[in-house]
Amino acid sequence: MIIDSSQDSAQADLPAPACGAGRLPEPGAVEAEFAGADDTLVQRRWMEAAVAVRFEELAPVAAFAVVPGRRWGPGWWWSATTGRHVMHGSQAMCMQLMILDRDPQVVSLSARPVRLIWQDPDSRRTLTWVPQLFARYADGRALLADCPPTAEPAAGRAARAAAVLEAVCAAAGFAYRRLVPPDAVVAANVRWLAGYRHPRHRDASGLEQAVLEAFAAPRALMAGAAAAGEVLSALPVLYHALWSGRLTADLARPLGEHTLVSAGCPDTARDGTEQEQEQYAR
């Protein structure tokens, strides 16, 4: 019997495996299922697929569920990193797409590109799990991630799957994380800046250099925008620079006219983004 352990499984009423007790499958025995070139499903050993398959280029292996009565359904996120749309199935997933899209070390993103399949060593049942996100980093690192709606620890089937995925990803040189939602203020600020992520805002009205020079020394947001030129023209450029990390601000505080904005440093921005991801990973 195959138990689909994906987040929106229609078989959610099936009993979950016991958490914390039980053996994990050997990484070499785990299978990976993904969409081939002609959209037919391909199944290979996970350890082989992790090396050979460019998961960032694949279409979702499973559709996101549409639940009648739910106010939020599947949608598309336009990625400034890739210039392509990435599917998402929840507000929590969309938020994590924004955070990863803003990370200067992330070079590609995809949604649900692989289904992992294994036999539970204790029950002998065949289990599966479809991680929600895949991210590739500039140094070649790869991340499979799920996006729970709360910071509560995983429980039941999700906890068991997380333990399996963490082990098999580590064996393949990948990372697996549960990316929990950021603080509400951080989320609001990232959503606001994401509205200015498109490259057209980078040098709108030819003000890019003036905006960057205005914040060569730390300065209040609105004062710097006024110093760069006409405020309404300078603000989109300023927000794009904050999105991209060329300017920095404390996103743990609400963005406003008195927010202190400083020049960004690529290395500092990269380290800060990784620390933020670690903070919201569990």
Image (cartoon, helix red, strand yellow):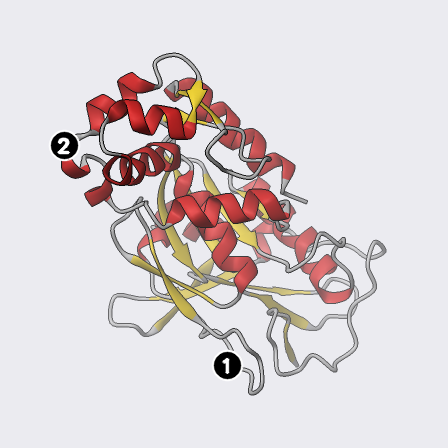
- Secondary structure under tag 1 reads loop
Tell me, for residue 66, which label it has, or none.
1
- In the picture provided, is 23 more to the left or to the right than 188? right
Query: How far across and down, in percent of the image, does residue 11 sit?
Result: 66, 82
Give the residue drawn at x 63%, y 58%: 148
Rendered position, 216 above or below 210: above
Q: Earlier in the sequence, mark 2 or mark 1?
A: 1
- Secondary structure under tag 2 reads helix
Q: Is residue 223 visible?
A: yes
Give the residue drawn at x 23%, y 33%: 230
- Where, by quadrant of the figure, is residue 217 drawn? top left
Query: How far across and down, in percent of the image, does residue 50 sit?
Result: 44, 48
Give the residue drawn at x 42%, y 29%: 221
Rendered position, 67 above or below 37: below
Using the image as rendered, state which of residue 251 and residue 143 is in the foreground.
251
Q: Distance of mark 2 from mark 1, alpha carbons? A: 44 Å
Kind of residue indicated by mark 2: Gly
Using the image as rendered, state which of residue 29 and residue 49 is in the foreground.
49
Give the residue drawn at x 39%, y 55%: 110
Graded by Cα atoms within 10 Å as few (under 14), some (14 to 19) or many (20 or more), the crowding at tag 1 reads: few
- For the C terminus, which image quadrant? top right
In the rendered image, the residue lying farthest to the top is 217
Kind of residue indicated by mark 1: Val
Query: How far across and down, in percent of the image, does residue 132 sit?
Result: 51, 60
Q: Which residue is mark 2?
A: 206
- For the N terminus, which image quadrant? bottom right
- Where, by quadrant of the figure, is residue 146 drawn? bottom right
Q: Is residue 135 visible?
A: no
